[in-house]
Image (cartoon, grey):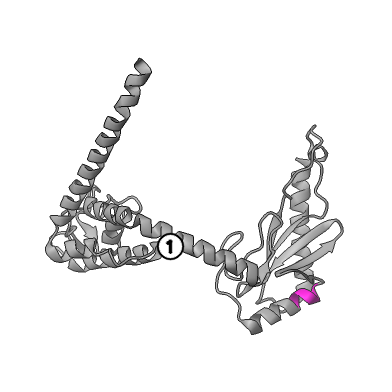
Amino acid sequence: MRRSADVWKLPLQTERIRRLESELWSARRTIVGMAAEPLAEALLNYRDCQSEDDFWRWRQQAIETVISAATVDPEISYLQPRAWCPLCRGGSSGPFDRGFSIPEGMRRHLDGHGNVAACPVTAAAFWLAREGLQDRFEADKRTKEAILLERRETERLYLTHPNEPPRLLEERVEGWIGELRDAAAMHAAEQRLLALGFGMETSGNVVSWRLQTEGWTVLADPRSVGRIACVLYRTEILPVASIGRSRKRHSPRPVTSSFTLLDTWKHDIPGKFRQRMEDAARELSARDES
């Protein structure tokens, strides 16, 4: 009987949760609506956003609109322009400073970033926007995933890391992908790799720049302007037991070490490459012995 009673409670609990969610939405909407009309309008004008990228652009524009409405207070602006928040009238919690510096301190306050007290009004506005746009975010995400899948089936992919799937030209693999090379810069990078002994391997629409030497393999990533990223790993994946453990299975993922070739190098490029490759190999060997 107890179990049956608990089942009957579920609809009531669900209804209570819905009521609380509605009340929370109304409370946050009221908080934003209490701001001056132009600012409240800017903080609620998110309905044209169709994607998460649109949301972040709108959010930044809303923050800049509020900053532009801040009035510098000469009584607290001794060394730099400072103002109270035009939304919550808050200021710094520090023992000496009052208000917020303009624009950076105010921006951090409105953004809720860093060690500055976050503005409750913008926090409420951005929550409302995210809640209201969530269905659009999901739809946009599904659309982008479908486009990405189609591109991966038809466009050139680059295999640049042994533990990661091949990526499109602009997709990051490990770390940061900066400005992409144009056709001429890519050709120059590929010529440099050929001169260093790399070979270009192609399998379907997947391309990899690979160098194998003395038990090591190096994969090169020439996509970014200014640098060629290299990842070194053992050609044969070592048994786990050979690196100081008793188990006899093989590690499924190679341990890697990374290094970089710079486009600005002009002299003894093979020597510089060889030195960095040897340093990376010593690093991995030291890991094996530890």
Mark 1, residue position: 140
User: Does residue 81 appear in this view?
Assistant: no
What residue is drawn where x is 85% and y is 56%? 215
Q: Which residues are magenta?
A: 192-196
Q: Nearer the viewer, residue 38 or 113?
A: 38
Q: Work out whether 186 lies above or below 80.
A: below
Quadrant the N terminus occupies = top left
Q: Nearer the viewer, residue 19 or 114?
A: 19
Q: Is residue 54 magenta?
A: no
What residue is drawn where x is 26% and y is 65%? 62
Q: Is residue 199 left or right of residue 89?
A: right
The quarter of the displayed image where residue 42 is located: bottom left
Tell me residue 15's x, y (percent). Answer: 26, 36
Determine the residue located farthest toward the bottom in the rendered image. 184
What residue is drawn where x is 20% and y is 43%? 23
* Residue count near mark 1 (Cα–Cα under 10 Å), binned few <14, some 14–19, many ≥20: some
Tell me residue 158's x, y (percent). Answer: 67, 67
Tell me residue 281's x, y (percent). Answer: 78, 55
User: Does residue 57 appear in this view?
Assistant: yes
Helix, strand or loop under label 1: helix
Q: Work out whether 127 lies above or below 38.
A: above
Quadrant the C terminus occupies = top right
Q: Is residue 228 left or right of residue 147?
A: right
The quarter of the displayed image where residue 36 is located: bottom left
Q: Nearer the viewer, residue 200 or 197?
A: 200
Determine the residue located farthest toward the right in the rendered image. 214
Q: Nearer the viewer, residue 73 or 182?
A: 182
What residue is drawn where x is 71% and y is 56%? 162
Secondary structure mostly seen in magenta is helix
**Amino acid on which disc 1 is placed:** Asp
Tell me residue 187's x, y (percent). Answer: 70, 81
